[in-house]
Amino acid sequence: MRTYRYSSRNALLLLVAWLSFNVYATCQAMSSDMQSARAAAAGGSDLVQPVQGAARLVVRRAPNLGANVTVRLWVDGAQVGTIGYGHTYQGSLAPGRHILSVQPSPRPRSGTPWQMTLDVRSGKTYSFTATGDSGQLILKGGLAAPRVL
């Protein structure tokens, strides 16, 4: 059995640590790309053109939720996006009544997502911020003021 000197052993440990980090970083990047593709398919991308007469939905994530907490967003029971630290969801909604739900991830305090009913009017923009309130993740906001250019 061959014994390694300290410098050889340290180099080997450094190589293993470097390879482990690269595998982890690659997996994280691939996961992020898949989430972006899923959000784009669900209407969460700026590249997707809104349907004629649809309203716009914007959900920001409050920075005080913590760096490791993501916000899962559902519209009418279908998950449409996951909002990470420093990110915003943008999508379109058909006019009518919708149920918006949010839940923190990975560890929600309650198994049931927080919900609200939203009556959507054509051509309007609805802007919310996902924030914490008494240990519960909620959406604050509503109909956004028109932008002045």
Image (cartoon, helix red, strand yellow):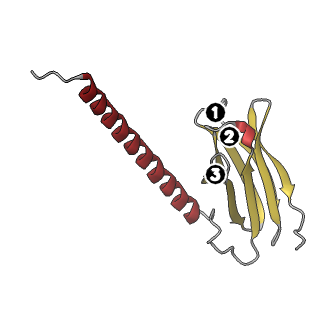
Q: At x 89% / y 68%, what residue is drawn? A: 146
Tell me where residue 114 appears, x and y as whole percent. Answer: 72, 41
Residue at image mark 1: 108
Q: Nearer the viewer, residue 7 or 87?
A: 7
The part of the image, by quadrant, that contains residue 144 is bottom right
The residue at 84%/51% (across/down) is 141
Q: Amino acid at mark 2?
A: Pro
Q: Nearer the viewer, mark 1 or mark 2?
A: 1
Q: Amino acid at mark 1?
A: Pro
Give the residue at the far bottom of this rendering: 52
Q: Position of residue 123 (x, y in %)?
A: 81, 72
Residue that label 2 marks: 113
User: On the image, numbered disc 3 is attached to which residue?
Assistant: 77
* Mark sitting on residue 42: none
In primary-sequence order, the first of circles 1 and 2 is 1
**Residue 82 image offset from top left, x and y in percent:** 61, 50
The reply to whether the C-beta atoms of the residues labelled 1 and 2 are less than 8 Å apart is: yes
Q: Is residue 5 left or right of residue 44?
A: left
The C terminus lies in quadrant: bottom right
Q: Is residue 23 above or below residue 97?
A: above
Quote the CA–CA distance across marks 2 and 3.
10 Å
Say above or below: 123 vs 88: below
